[in-house]
Image (tube, rainbow, N blue to C red):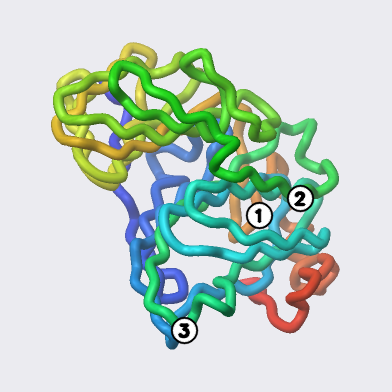
Amino acid sequence: MLKHILKPRKKNIGNFPVNRLLPSAKQKMIGPWIFFDHFGPVELSENKALDILPHPHINLVTVTYLFDGEIVHRDSIGSFQTIKPGDLNLMVAGKGITHSEREPLEIRKNKRLMHGLQFWLALPNEFEEIEPAFFHYSKENLPTFEVNDAQIKLIIGTAWNKSSPVKTYCDTLFAKINILKGNSLTLPNEEEIGIYVLSGEIVINQEKVTQHSLGILDKESTHILASTDCDLLLIGGENIGKRFIEWNFVSGRSERISQAKDDWKAQRFNKVIGDEGEFIPLP
């Protein structure tokens, strides 16, 4: 049996349609994954662009992956990186970081699609207050392979006897799977695991998981069957314990979130280098 099937909460963030899956009332986390937004696809024009103003994070890792579009990442430790479809951006907030995410100026005059994923990973207790860091991985460096006719891109973690080079702080899994109608796949053995249907429909233990739903699997649910051609996202890893989450902050200690709110309100966070003029105020 599936433990849960999560349906997305529809959000609009800066006029962008967003499916939010985590956290939810039924399931706060899947392994270390504590936040899951699927944004777009949305067509943008000269008068409509992605501009996420500078904002802070603590005690977490942001994971950004695009299907369409381009985003320029800047942060308070001096990182400057354009992410394109198939690449991965990993930002380690640690003891505190500020960043912005904006479309490049040179593409804004043209019609274009924006479509992608933003996840947050909670850091294990011993890593929550590490120095902030940023890592970028080009799509050429992320393993792609085939298992039982399923096309798999292993973005984070180790599975199916393959390993991704992406930095991790605990057992963490993230994979993209393309599987054709009628085919099945055995999933990796993880302490906690969930599968999101980007497109299509799958069956797990005779239960359907439809498009834009996130199935949370139990230990007995290790096989999926594609009832249509499907694009899927697999996330999972080890349970690292309870986390508090408020606004852009995640921590194992509620008092640490209170401190971060006070620090942001008083503008004690370092500013984004090269993007100092604006910021998102504390709600």
Residue 165's spot in the image, x, y percent? 65, 30
* SS for dot 1: strand
Which tag, 2 or 3, sits closer to the chain's start? Answer: 3
Residue 188's spot in the image, x, y percent? 44, 17
Q: Is residue 255 in view from this perspective?
A: no
**37 and 247: which is toward the camera:** 37
Q: Amino acid at mark 3?
A: Lys
Q: Dot 3, how many residues are within 10 Å of its Cα: few (below 14), some (14-19), or many (20+)? A: few
Which tag, 1 or 2, sits closer to the chain's start? Answer: 1
Say which residue appears at 52% left-offset and 29% top-offset.
Answer: 143
Most extreme residue toward the front is 140
Which of the 4 image quarters holds residue 222?
A: top left
Q: Is residue 129 left or right of residue 49?
A: right
Dot 1 and dot 2 residues touching (CB under 8 Å): yes
Q: Is residue 133 left or right of residue 193?
A: right
Give the CA distance from mark 3 to mark 1: 34 Å
User: Closer to us: mark 1 or mark 2?
Assistant: 1
Q: Is residue 30 left or right of residue 82?
A: left
* SS for dot 2: helix
Q: Which residue is mark 3?
A: 109
Q: Amino acid at mark 2?
A: Arg
Give the CA distance from mark 1 to mark 2: 9 Å
Q: Which residue is mark 2?
A: 256
* SS for dot 3: loop
Q: Dot 2, how many residues are within 10 Å of its Cα: few (below 14), some (14-19), or many (20+)? A: some
User: Closer to us: mark 3 or mark 1?
Assistant: 3
Q: Amino acid at mark 1?
A: Phe
Q: Note whether 256 is above or below 275 in the view shown.
A: above
In what quadrant of the picture does the N terminus appear?
A: top left
Q: Which mark is residue 249?
A: 1
Which tag, 3 or 1, sits closer to the chain's start? Answer: 3
Residue 270's spot in the image, x, y percent? 84, 66
